Image: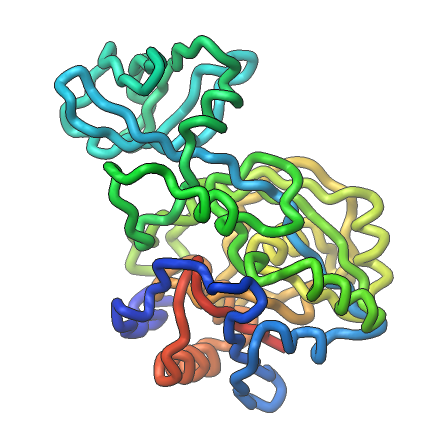
């Protein structure tokens, strides 16, 4: 299966740089897989598409302020993305660095108030190990200096102060468990009001937790889809959620993260189980979905694993048609953009 078959042309001005003024006022394209019908609605209309017997599954992972801006001893700015901390050492982290050309083991990186970090080693071509030196607890340090870990296509100048709006809006209203370095963006559209109206329609809401890793930003570099593999991400599903999902007539997954978590533990009959562990499930056309019956998702990058997943769910031709409709109608794309409901 050729990756080039999952491409489309997107005008750069349609890449959303800021969130919608009000979360639930984003637009929503509704795609019916059975009829092929495509409609343009607003996200707040989602309540018309759920009801008795439905379970809406959300990802309650919380994005932590994983992006830091420091300076080298030479004065040059350097950007740090925290990935994971070393077990039992809360101030030692695997990170990505940018730019990393002139970084060597032993390099010191400086922050405000006397805080610093030292490069301990290079783990791989892209990953480094840093040891932070702070006078306060590391979580307090992050709360003071950490920035929202926005994807690279959302442009923010390093020299600008951190954006408090990004720290709030690059987060779902139901986020609880810290651990993600990228937001489960399909959930960014929800408000407490929309969640309440979904419940009043008779649908239930259940939460899973999947901590989104930096692999969500990585492009597919193989020509053949089947040769690509995903970075592992940790996830958990409680006994309570498993019970609610197994009693559902239809599961509406909010985002590709919820979809991958559910499909990772679903058996041939579509029943899921409580679980805590990792998944590297890569869903692309040809995959047979076992549990997810409808999906809310944002509009994804061409030739990405996320676009391949929605093509697997709804069919490549229908997805390309829906994306073409979204472009023609000037939808806003990617993390801060509009959304799509696939029925």
**In the image, is 293 to the left or to the right of 89?**
right
Q: Residue at x 79, y 58 (%)?
A: 245
Front in this rendered view, residue 317 or 254: 254
User: Can you say whether 252 is above or below 260 in the image?
Assistant: below
**In the image, is 281 to the left or to the right of 242?**
left
**Which quadrant of the structure image shows residue 130?**
top left
Quadrant (top left, top right, bottom left, bottom right) of the C terminus: bottom right
**In the image, is 305 to the left or to the right of 17?**
right
Residue 242, image x and y in percent?
A: 80, 50
Q: Residue at x 62, y 86 (%)?
A: 34
Residue 45, image x and y in percent?
A: 64, 77
Colour mapping = rainbow
Residue 264, image x and y in percent?
A: 64, 50
Residue 115, image x and y in percent?
A: 36, 14
Q: Residue at x 63, y 73 (%)?
A: 44
Front in this rendered view, residue 188 or 247: 188
Quadrant (top left, top right, bottom left, bottom right) of the N terminus: bottom left
Front in this rendered view, residue 115 or 58: 115
User: Can you say whether 147 is above or below 15 in the image?
Assistant: above
User: Can you say whether 315 is above or below 263 in the image?
Assistant: below
**Which quadrant of the structure image shows residue 123?**
top left
How many discs appear? 0
User: Can you say whether 253 is above or below 315 in the image?
Assistant: above
Q: Is residue 161 visible?
A: yes
Q: Is residue 231 visible?
A: no
Q: Residue at x 51, y 21 (%)?
A: 140
């Amino acid at each position: 299966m050729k990756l080039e078959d999952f491409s489309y042309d997107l005008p750069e001005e349609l890449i959303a740089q800021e969130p919608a003024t009000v979360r639930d006022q984003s637009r929503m394209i509704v795609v019916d897989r059975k009829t092929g019908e495509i409609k343009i609605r607003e996200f707040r209309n989602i309540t018309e598409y759920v009801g008795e017997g439905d379970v809406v599954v959300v990802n309650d992972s919380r994005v932590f302020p994983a992006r830091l801006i420091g300076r080298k001893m030479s004065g040059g700015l350097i950007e740090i993305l925290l990935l994971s901390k070393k077990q039992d050492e809360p101030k030692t982290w695997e990170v990505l660095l940018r730019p990393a050309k002139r970084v060597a083991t032993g390099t010191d990186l400086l922050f405000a108030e006397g805080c610093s970090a030292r490069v301990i080693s290079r783990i791989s071509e892209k990953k480094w190990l840093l040891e932070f030196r702070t006078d306060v607890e590391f979580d307090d340090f992050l709360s003071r200096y950490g920035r929202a870990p926005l994807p690279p296509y959302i442009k923010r100048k390093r020299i600008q102060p951190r954006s408090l709006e990004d720290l709030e809006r690059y987060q779902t209203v139901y986020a609880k468990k810290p651990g993600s370095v990228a937001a489960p963006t399909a959930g960014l559209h929800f408000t407490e009001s929309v969640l309440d109206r979904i419940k009043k329609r008779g649908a239930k809401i259940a939460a899973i937790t999947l901590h989104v890793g930096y692999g969500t930003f990585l492009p597919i570099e193989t020509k053949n889809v089947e040769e690509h593999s995903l970075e592992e991400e940790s996830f958990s599903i409680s006994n309570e959620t498993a019970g609610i999902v197994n009693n559902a007539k239809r599961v509406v997954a909010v985002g590709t993260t919820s979809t991958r978590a559910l499909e990772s533990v679903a058996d041939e009959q579509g029943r899921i189980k409580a679980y805590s562990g990792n998944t590297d499930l890569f869903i692309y056309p040809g995959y047979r979905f076992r549990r997810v019956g409808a999906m809310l998702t944002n509009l994804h990058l061409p030739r990405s694993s996320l676009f391949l997943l929605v093509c697997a769910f709804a069919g490549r031709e229908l997805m390309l048609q829906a994306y073409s409709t979204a472009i023609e109608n000037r939808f806003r794309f990617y993390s801060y953009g509009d959304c799509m409901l696939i029925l």
